[in-house]
Amino acid sequence: MFIKILLFSLCLNRFTRSEIIIGTWSGDFKKAVQAGGDILASGGSSLDAVETACRTCEELQCERTVGYGGSPDEHGETTLDALIIDGTTMNMGAVAALRRVKNVIGVARKVLENTKHSMLAGDLATQFARSMGFPEEPLSTSESKLKWKTWRENYCQPNFWTNVKPDPKTSCGPYKSMNFLDRLSMMETNENIGKYNHDTIGVVAIDGRGNVAAGTSTNGANHKIPGRVGDSPIPGAGAYAVTGVGGAAATGDGDIMLRFLPSFLIVELLRAGHTVQEAVQTAVERIAQLYPNFSGAVIGVSQEGEYAAMCHGMKEFPYNVAKRTKSGEWEVMEQRVDCGLGINGL
């Protein structure tokens, strides 16, 4: 019995030393990681830290790519996606295409805690949110309305349509599918859909009890086709976590990245004995092999608190890490990955 207690104590001490929260991007995203770090510093859970970080970004409207007032779709409406996953129980909650409710990560947490489902979507997710006490309010702002109006005046450029007519490069539609002969003469459609279009907040946290959690929050892609759901609320794509192994999150071109489940791959590579750096590099290389022009990044952290990031299709990728220093104080550090080299982490 004494030996069992001793082993448990040693494991607990190892987990305590690995308390950490890591999150994507810089600027207000750093404030979000700081807020999550404050939860861990006060003895809070990894789930609370992840939710707090994402909610902070929603309230700050980080780069207008998280929260209300950003990324209007083709109809000018802002909708929200979020995911939170408990790596200890493998329970999760996700919301996709949420309308008229600002605290999307809070709604996702309610899906996790108050239902046996994993994901809710659209107007019926809004109905669920109302039943859980979340206020219904507009997500559009004067800024997002102006962005949509400017886009319309520019012949709806860029957009996400392909293999349709009239030509989506010069028209706002409505579109119809092209036949095979028309497609043969069709040049490749828009790929560059602009800066500040993929800045999902992705967060992974490990608390003092060793529990790993991960989550995401986003308002999706600018000018997306209404109803579109990207990688952020999809477990294994936007984020993933397994207590005893580690966690990961992704940000970038969600329509491409979700096809490869990069967050799941990173965690499984950690389980198989790879280093964090090897895991994040492999995840990005898998995507780049088929989509060399994609833009995106991933972060990963092992149960021991080792972390790394990898990126592609941009000059560099910033992310933030909050952890205890040797003196016991919490510190938030901004890291940057050179996407040409893809080497950064501890």
Image (cartoon, rainbow, N blue to C red):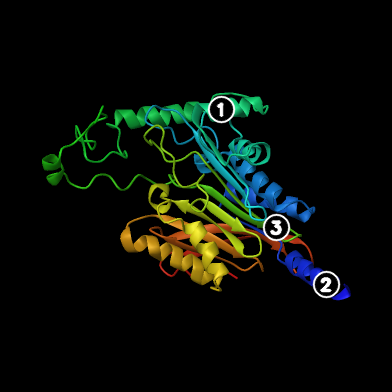
On screen, residue 209 versus residue 253, left or right, reads right
On screen, residue 22 versus residue 146, left or right, reads right
Instruction: Give residue 76's quadrant in the image.
Output: top left
- For disc 3, the marked residue is 211
Specify the label residue 325 is tagged with.
none
Within 10 Å of disc 2 (Cα), the crowding (few <14, some 14-19, many 20+) is few
- Residue 126 at x, y = what percent? 56, 27
- For disc 2, the marked residue is 4
- Residue 83 at x, y = what percent? 57, 44
Within 10 Å of disc 1 (Cα), the crowding (few <14, some 14-19, many 20+) is many
- For disc 1, the marked residue is 126
The answer for how far apart the CA atoms under marks 2 and 3 are is 20 Å
- Amino acid carrying label 2: it is Lys
Mark 2–mark 1 CB contact (< 8 Å): no
Q: Quadrant of the N terminus?
A: bottom right
Mark in the foreground, 2 or 3: 2
The answer for how far apart the CA atoms under marks 3 and 1 are is 30 Å
Q: Nearer the viewer, residue 285 or 327?
A: 285
* Above or below, comparing residue 264 to residue 269 in the picture: above
- Secondary element at tag 1: helix
* Above or below, comparing residue 305 to residue 146 in the picture: below
Look at the image and tell me whether residue 248 can be seen: yes
On screen, residue 157 versus residue 248, left or right, reads left
